[in-house]
Image (tube, rainbow, N blue to C red):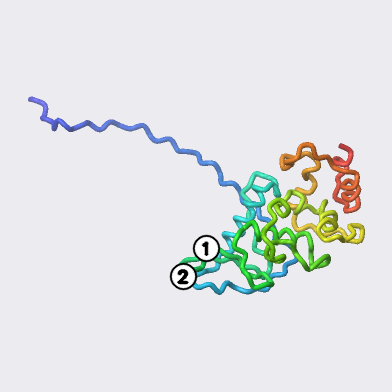
């Protein structure tokens, strides 16, 4: 008996080896940053037509900005647990195209909106340093001062969020005596841990390898009780 004819294009199916299961890497755990304890937000929403609430975007992008600036230690990902009290973020989904921005942060006492992450982080840094308005009600950010951003002057430095340097920064920015200030409370374990491995101790966050901790900074750290014996004796 002759074998059945087959179409010229026919290809016999062959058993295929089972596809190995790909072992995916576990997702990196998000590290949450607390917002500053003090806030001057007035809880005013955005009045632009076609904008909806979107705090989550700003909570993520601000933390990424700080990570890129070296203000918090890598690796990420980080995000803020929430915006400071009285502030809220919005994004455009429709509306008048004459409005030249797609995202804003509302809540500033002036009634104006922050339109860039960098400008709002400047204000966030002041909220972190000032704490409960005890030093000076005037923030040096572009929104509060009414002047354009001064490129290098207000860029986020690693010291801006460090309790070790808080009293010294207050004296530099606002002319107050560091000795007259009480040690500020820690905003959270992450920032506190970072303060113990700050730029002066030669961490990977340090962008100035020639920078050495001064005796004044060392004494300030002792006064604030934030200098561990292992660091002090190194």
**Res 95 label:** 2
- Residue at point 50%, 73% (across, down): 49
- Farthest front residue in view: 147
Say left or right for 9 vs 168.
left
- Where residue 34 appears, as percent x and y from the top left, is 70, 59
- Residue plotted at (78% across, 49% down): 195
Residue at position x 78%, y 52% from top? 162
Image quadrant in which you'd find residue 46? bottom right
Q: Is residue 25 above or below residue 7?
A: below
Looking at marks 2 and 1 on the same chain, the residue that comes earlier in the sequence is marked by 2
22 and 222: which one is in front? 222
- Quadrant location, the C terminus: top right
Which is nearer the eye, 215 or 224? 215
Total labels: the figure holds 2
Tell me where residue 83 sits by quadrant: bottom right
User: Image height check: is 44 above or below 100?
Assistant: below
Query: Disc 2 on helix, strand or loop?
Result: loop
Q: Relative to 190, does residue 234 appear above or below in the rendering?
A: above
Side of 152 relative to 170 (left or right): left
Q: Position of residue 108 (x, y in %)?
A: 67, 69
- Identify the secondary structure beneath mark 1: loop
Which class describes the residues within 10 Å of circle 1: few (<14), some (14-19), or many (20+)?
some
Q: Which residue is mark 1?
A: 102
Mark 2–mark 1 Cα distance, whole angstroms, equals 10 Å
Residue 185's x, y, as percent? 81, 59
Q: Are marks 2 and 1 in contact (CB under 8 Å)?
A: no
């Amino acid at each position: 008996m002759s074998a059945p004819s087959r179409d010229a294009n026919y290809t016999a199916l062959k058993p295929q080896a089972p596809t190995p299961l790909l072992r995916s890497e576990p997702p990196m755990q998000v590290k949450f940053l607390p917002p500053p304890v003090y806030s001057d937000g007035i809880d005013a929403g955005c009045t632009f037509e076609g904008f909806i609430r979107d705090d989550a975007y700003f909570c993520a992008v601000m933390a990424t900005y700080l990570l890129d600036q070296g203000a918090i230690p890598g690796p990420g990902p980080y995000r803020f647990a929430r915006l400071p009290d009285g502030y809220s973020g919005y994004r455009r989904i429709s509306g008048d195209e004459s409005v030249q921005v797609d995202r804003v942060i509302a809540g500033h006492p002036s009634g104006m909106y922050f339109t860039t992450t960098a400008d709002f982080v400047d204000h966030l840094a002041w909220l972190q340093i000032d704490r409960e308005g005890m030093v000076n009600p005037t923030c040096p950010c572009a929104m509060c001062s009414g002047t354009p951003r001064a490129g290098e002057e207000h860029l986020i430095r690693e010291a801006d969020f460090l309790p070790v340097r808080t009293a010294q920064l207050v004296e530099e920015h606002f002319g107050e005596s560091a000795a007259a200030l009480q040690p500020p409370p820690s905003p959270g374990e992450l920032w506190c841990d970072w303060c113990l491995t700050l730029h002066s101790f030669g961490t990977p966050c340090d962008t100035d390898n020639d920078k050495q901790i001064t005796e004044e900074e060392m004494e300030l750290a002792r006064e604030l009780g934030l200098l561990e014996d292992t660091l002090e004796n190194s």
